[in-house]
Image: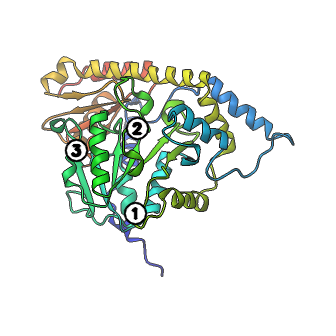
């Protein structure tokens, strides 16, 4: 028989979010009267802006006509959409042929791991979005977990003590550095000075940064960079991954993109852009034509305003969660709150508690689902991630319940 891919054998436990769902499901089965509210997984909840949904509806109906029908499109994406992304969101910092349209950021990260293969060294922020590590394990770029982390992965702790920006000196030469800002799960936003430090390190140590900017539209502080390409020197060391999931509510619609500068090279001088083009044209057949019509609408003035309104709605929830966690019951427990107001997440430390124990307590006593910080990496232990994605009335009710907890 064919041997199993050892990468799967090396994975520990289950992927974080299915485990959260499993615990919720088991609790609901035992407590069918409980009315669960989720402040957990980062799934959007508000309806698509009508202007954007209408564009997809019109395109879809057009497929039923000879003049509106379309079959396969370019695997790299709709030409108009690629140009709009370069123009509207990158303002000359990227060209349209450096933009590759996809079915979402998570899928792009998996293809990135195919691009770089099993021999590359990995460095990740700790805590970090699980797919950076788990996907690397599956492709063989990381080995077994020794209880402190996966072999072959350099963990860069991002904690309150270092202002959530890592000590880069631990990163090995020729590493792939996964970096997310605004960060999931901590919500931390890197400054231009911090990103310049990261870029300079990558260039001087022959590293490539995989910059996850999926939450860029939550940034309200004009001093904070929304893309790595605002930083001088980034075009020779960075790939940016992004998505319409959070700003446009496309978590189920699926549309994202990557930016791969032409200046970015492998050690032998080969263009990374060229090989990425091969990956996208070989392993991917292009994003849905209907969905890409929605992406074009997102970048029209009316679409941009509609997306901002939705993000503002979630940021109101962020403030509600923050205020709740500043309540007397949480103060008595010594809970520490970290929130920038430029992210959909509130990151809170419960000193002396294990993350899953806090998760279980909040679920059982408040009937509220959260996300345990330890699921994002060793440095996430004792932390809980609270998500602002939810209807405001539900978030308000969840916070009312949280305010009555005793630790």
Secondary structure of the residue carrying numbered label 3 = loop
User: To which quarter of the image does residue 119 belong?
Assistant: bottom left
Instruction: Tell me the distance, in whole angstroms, between the alpha carbons under discs 2 and 1.
Output: 23 Å
Mark 1 crowd level (few <14, some 14–19, many ≥20, 10 Å Cα) = many
Residue 229 falls left or right of residue 292: left
- x%, y% of residue 291? 64, 39
Residue at (44, 18) in percent of width and height: 393
Which residue shows up at 18% across the image and 34% down it?
Answer: 350
- The residue furthest bottom is 1
Residue under the image location 33 percent in, 19 percent down: 319
- From the image, state whether disc 1 or disc 3 is nearer to you: 3
Q: Which residue is mark 2?
A: 41
Q: Is residue 205 above or below residue 247?
A: below
Residue ID at (30%, 26%)? 340
Frontmost residue, 81 versus 359: 81
Quarter of the image where one finds residue 68: top right
User: Mark 3 and mark 1 in contact (Cβ < 8 Å)?
Assistant: no
Q: Which numbered disc flags the more N-terminal residue, 1 or 3?
A: 1
Q: Is residue 15 visible?
A: no
Q: Secondary structure at mark 2?
A: loop
Q: CA distance from mark 2 to mark 3?
A: 25 Å
Distance between the Cα atoms at labels 1 and 3? 25 Å
Which residue has dot 3 on it? Answer: 166
Q: Percent position (x, y) of residue 277?
A: 56, 57
Residue 175: x %, y % from top left: 31, 59
In front of the other: label 2 or label 1? 1
Q: Which residue is mark 1?
A: 138
């Amino acid at each position: 028989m064919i041997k199993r891919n050892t990468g799967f054998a090396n994975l520990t436990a289950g992927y974080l979010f299915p485990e959260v769902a499993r615990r919720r499901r088991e609790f609901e089965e035992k407590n069918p009267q409980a009315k669960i509210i989720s402040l957990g997984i980062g799934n959007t909840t508000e309806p698509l802006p009508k202007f954007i949904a209408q564009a997809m509806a019109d395109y879809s109906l057009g497929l039923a006509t000879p003049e509106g029908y379309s079959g396969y499109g370019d695997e790299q994406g709709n030409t108009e959409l690629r140009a709009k992304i370069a123009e509207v969101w990158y303002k000359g910092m990227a060209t349209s042929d450096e933009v590759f349209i996809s079915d979402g950021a998570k899928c792009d990260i998996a293809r990135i791991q195919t691009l770089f293969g099993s021999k590359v060294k990995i460095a990740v922020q700790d805590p970090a979005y699980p797919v950076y590590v788990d996907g690397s394990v599956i492709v063989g770029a990381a080995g077994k977990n020794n209880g402190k982390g996966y072999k072959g992965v350099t963990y860069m702790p991002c904690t309150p003590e270092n202002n959530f920006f890592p000590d880069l000196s631990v990163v090995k030469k020729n590493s792939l550095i996964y970096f997310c800002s605004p960060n999931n799960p901590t919500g931390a936003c890197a400054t231009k000075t911090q990103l310049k430090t990261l870029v300079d390190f990558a260039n001087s140590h022959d590293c490539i940064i995989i910059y996850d900017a999926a939450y860029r539209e939550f940034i309200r502080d004009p001093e904070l960079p929304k893309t790595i390409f605002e930083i001088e020197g980034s075009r020779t060391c960075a790939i940016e991954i992004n998505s319409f999931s959070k700003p446009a509510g496309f978590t189920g619609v699926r549309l994202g993109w990557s930016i791969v500068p032409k200046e970015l090279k492998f050690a032998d001088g080969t263009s990374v852009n060229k090989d990425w083009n091969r990956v996208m044209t070989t392993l991917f057949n292009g994003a849905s034509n209907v969905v890409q019509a929605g992406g074009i609408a997102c970048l029209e003035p009316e679409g941009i305003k509609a997306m901002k309104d939705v993000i503002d709605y979630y940021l109101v929830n962020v403030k509600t969660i923050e205020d709740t966690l500043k309540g007397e019951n949480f103060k008595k427990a010594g809970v520490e709150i970290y929130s920038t107001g430029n992210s959909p997440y509130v990151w809170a430390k419960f000193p002396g508690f294990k993350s899953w124990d806090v998760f279980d307590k909040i679920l059982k006593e408040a009937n509220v689902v959260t996300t345990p910080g330890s699921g994002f990496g060793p440095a996430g232990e004792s932390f809980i991630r609270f998500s602002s994605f939810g209807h405001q009335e539900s978030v308000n009710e969840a916070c009312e319940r949280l305010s009555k907890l005793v630790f």
